[in-house]
Image (spheres, rainbow, N blue to C red):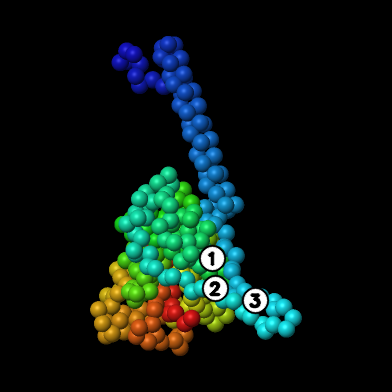
Amino acid sequence: MPRRYRKLRGDTAYYPFAARTGLRARQRRHARLLRVLGTAALALAAVLLVRQTVFRGGQPNAPAPIAAAQTITPAPGQTHVTVAPVAATRDALADTREADAAAHTTPESAAAPTVESTAILPQYRALYEENPDLVGWLRIDGTDIDLPVVQTPGDNEYYLRRGFDRFYAMGGTLFLDERCSLSPDAPADNWLIYGHNMRDGSMFGQLVYYRDEDFYKAHPTFTFDTLYEHATWQVVAALDTALGADEQPYYTFFDAANKLDWQRRVEAITALALYDTGITPEYGTQLLTLSTCGDTRPDTDARFAILAMRVG
């Protein structure tokens, strides 16, 4: 195009016809491309929305509870007999990490479970076979938190934006910090479970209900089962804080060096409590911390956490 026409707009009468025609053709191509990209973006958003709402972000439904004992009706003249299941073998998941490591990269690389299925509580066997990253199940009454917990040593944040089925999900999956051992022989002093504070209330979006003392009084306990045993947990403290705000942050507490160190770490957490629960853990009690963002903004440094101790 001659230099004298470069400052003219395409709708100017003096603009060369051929140049004007070419310009409008490019504008039409750009408009078509934008429409295609816009349609694709809307379709993707719709798929993610349906996945998040209808299919629970790739999360499985809660497994049906299995009766702790099975009663056999005695024949006439016989005494009543109750048959209890054989105690589960509680092998540490840490012993199977190397065998499971290949399953932590892509959905296609999922390996067969390496833990004997008879060692796992009956209601979790099928889920473990579906995804051997499963380490437990968390349930809090009064909320929609009734979800699996996974762990991926070597890739701690693998499930940050993946569902239990390992495909992309905005809400991710609740995951146990890789530094936490669930081994009954040498468990970490404090188990730390992370989850997103989702705007729609999914994942840990309703954990913040514990900011309200009345909610705590109505729901002072919850359950977190490992693959091998049921457990009930008493809420010790609910706290608001921020990344880097504390000298001894709760999210760095996994194992204490000794009793004094353990007590200092617990006191540092309870000192931030929003209200007094009247519960003080004793040294040696298994602790569990549930952690999420303080609000629904993805880039926030605010943190909300629940410290609990095992009571059953």
Q: Determine crowd level at label 1: few under 14, some 14-19, many 20+ residues with C-alpha closer than 10 A.
A: some
| Rendering coords of residue 148 (x, y %) | 49, 62
Q: Are marks 3 and 1 in contact (CB under 8 Å)?
A: no
Q: Mark 1 or mark 2, which has the lower sequence index? A: 2
Q: Are marks 1 and 2 in contact (CB under 8 Å)?
A: yes
How far is disc 3 from disc 1 in space, using C-alphas? Answer: 17 Å
What residue would you read off at disc 2?
85
How far is disc 1 from disc 2 in space, using C-alphas? Answer: 10 Å
| Rendering coords of residue 181 (x, y %) | 35, 69
Q: Determine crowd level at label 3: few under 14, some 14-19, many 20+ residues with C-alpha closer than 10 A.
A: few
State which mark lies toward you, 1 or 2.
Answer: 2
Residue farthest front in this picture:
77
What residue would you read off at disc 3?
71
Q: Give the vertical position of 25 relative to 176 (above or below).
A: above
Secondary structure at numbered mark 2? loop
What residue sits 25% from the left and 79% below the top?
Answer: 257
What residue sits 42% from the left and 49% below the top?
Answer: 110
**Which of the 4 image quarters holds residue 5?**
top left
Q: Give the vertical position of 53 relative to 246 (above or below).
A: above
Q: Give the vertical position of 196 relative to 269 (above or below).
A: above
**What amino acid type should be assigned to the residue bearing mark 1?**
Pro
Q: Give the vertical position of 216 relative to 8 (above or below).
A: below
Secondary structure at numbered mark 1? helix
| 54, 21: nearer the viewer | 54
Q: Mark 3 or mark 1, which has the lower sequence index? A: 3
| Rendering coords of residue 201 (x, y %) | 54, 62
Any part of residue 211 in sight = no
What residue would you read off at disc 1?
122
What residue sits 40% from the left and 57% below the top?
Answer: 114
Any part of residue 182 in sight = yes
